[in-house]
Amino acid sequence: MSGASAAGLPPAAAAAVMDGPHGPAALAARFAGAAWLDVVTRREALPALDDAVLLHAGPAFEGALPAPVRNAAIQALRFERLAADDAEGASLLASGRVRLQPAQDHGVATPLAQVVSASMPLARVGSARRTFLAPLVEGTPPALRFGSADPACIGRMAAIAALGLQVLAPLLRARPVALAAVIERALAAGDECHGRTAAANEALLAAIDGLAAADAALPASNPNFVLPVLMAAAGWLLAGGDADPLPGRIAGAGGNGIDFGLRVHGRQGWTCVPARPPVGGRLPGREAAMPLGAIGDSAVIDFCGLGGQAMHLAPALATEWAQWLQGDPLARRKAVVDTGSGCVDIVRVLASGAVPQVNLAILDLDGACGLLGRGFSLPDRALFGLDG
């Protein structure tokens, strides 16, 4: 595994960053105390939540669902055997007998377009004081998180559920995986832990004591397997980690494809702005497809100082996105991240006028292609009370 240097800096300056308050060890230290503890179904974790409720990313929907979320919701209903086919699933959604609610309102962070149903496996992450949840992801496309309508997703979700609940859960209960070391190793290797996760995935799987090679093959084939674990760790940190949350601090962030929103400790509900589509690299043949607005609860990673606020440690990704990036990534981090908590802070955003960068996959608007590429979005300044 090759090491990384701070993006765009000469060697001496890069070395100072790597060893300083914006280096891998310092960023990872914020997650001290967080561990991957278990894998449980949503029904086990949230027994009071009705099976007819599906959890989605970002703030609540006020109108029609984006096509990728609608696809994922229908797939979830089929996975739960609440619908025999797509038509019945669509009918359940249209009738109101199935309701969608924001996942983060229930202590769950869900990636991209994926909705979380009662039988889906969730990573439980945190400490004795507090935990947060995120659904395990089934693999590369086609996959539920990309809003795919491919029925193969249902069997793939069943396979990852079996692995998580039957294999990973007992191993994690016996020996939880501390995540600060996983994050530090990933950052030192050039992952910012959102757009690039291969090193993080390798480190996570290596840290699961007793995981047989045959069982590791499925998650090892998907570099994004680690992503929901990191999302749950970020959700735990934004919720307060091992401390009491401070009023005015950001409690959650995410997009639903239509709106992008923030939750703030001490305030009710979400503050929202229109979700800007991410910009970035496209997969071959998908350059002209219309992108969906920013979607996914994985924004919690960026608001915890990783992802878009760790681009100075991801030189390969910075090079890939060079034509779209705005300004120096380390300067952006210093402008928006609180030095004490390591998280994006509204007071600093207001003082600097800069906004945090959110690294996201790019999904297609009409739900036909699924994944278009990967890139980032800059939330509208009005989200933080800044003028346009």
Image: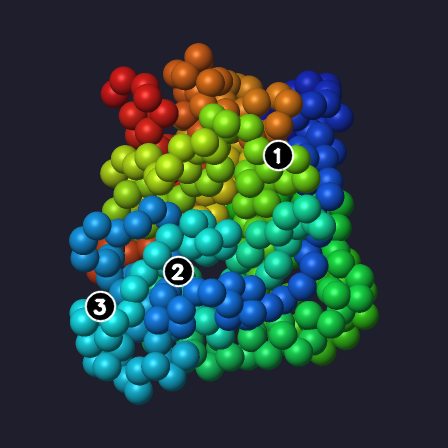
Q: Which residue is mark 1?
A: 244
Q: Earlier in the sequence, mark 1 or mark 3?
A: 3
Residue 167 vs residue 365: left or right?
right
Q: Nearer the viewer, residue 247 or 324?
A: 247
x, y percentage for residue 223? Answer: 58, 59
Q: Which residue is mark 3?
A: 96
Q: Tell me which corner region of the image, top left, top right, bottom left or bottom right, holds residue 54.
A: bottom left
Name the element at disc 3: loop
Q: Tell me which corner region of the image, top left, top right, bottom left or bottom right, holds residue 170.
A: bottom right
Q: Residue at x 60, y 37 (%)?
A: 240
Disc 3 crowd rating (10 Å Cα; few below 14, some 14-19, many 20+) is few
Q: Which residue is mark 2?
A: 55
Instruction: Decide: is 110 above or below 19.
Output: below
Q: Amino acid at mark 1?
A: Asp
Name the element at disc 1: loop
Q: Amino acid at mark 3?
A: Gly
Q: Residue at x 51, y 67 (%)?
A: 47
Q: Is residue 108 visible?
A: yes
- Measure the C-alpha gap from mark 1 to mark 3: 37 Å
Q: Nearer the viewer, residue 96 or 73?
A: 96
Disc 2 crowd rating (10 Å Cα; few below 14, some 14-19, many 20+) is many
Q: Amino acid at mark 2?
A: Leu
Name the element at disc 2: strand
Q: Nearer the viewer, residue 382 or 329?
A: 382
x, y percentage for residue 386? Answer: 32, 19
- Measure the C-alpha gap from mark 2 to mark 3: 14 Å
- Measure the C-alpha gap from mark 2 to mark 1: 26 Å
Instruction: Decide: is 322 above or below 37.
Output: above
Residue 385 vs residue 179: left or right?
left
Q: Earlier in the sequence, mark 2 or mark 1?
A: 2
Q: Earlier in the sequence, mark 2 or mark 3?
A: 2
Q: Residue at x 71, y 50 (%)?
A: 128
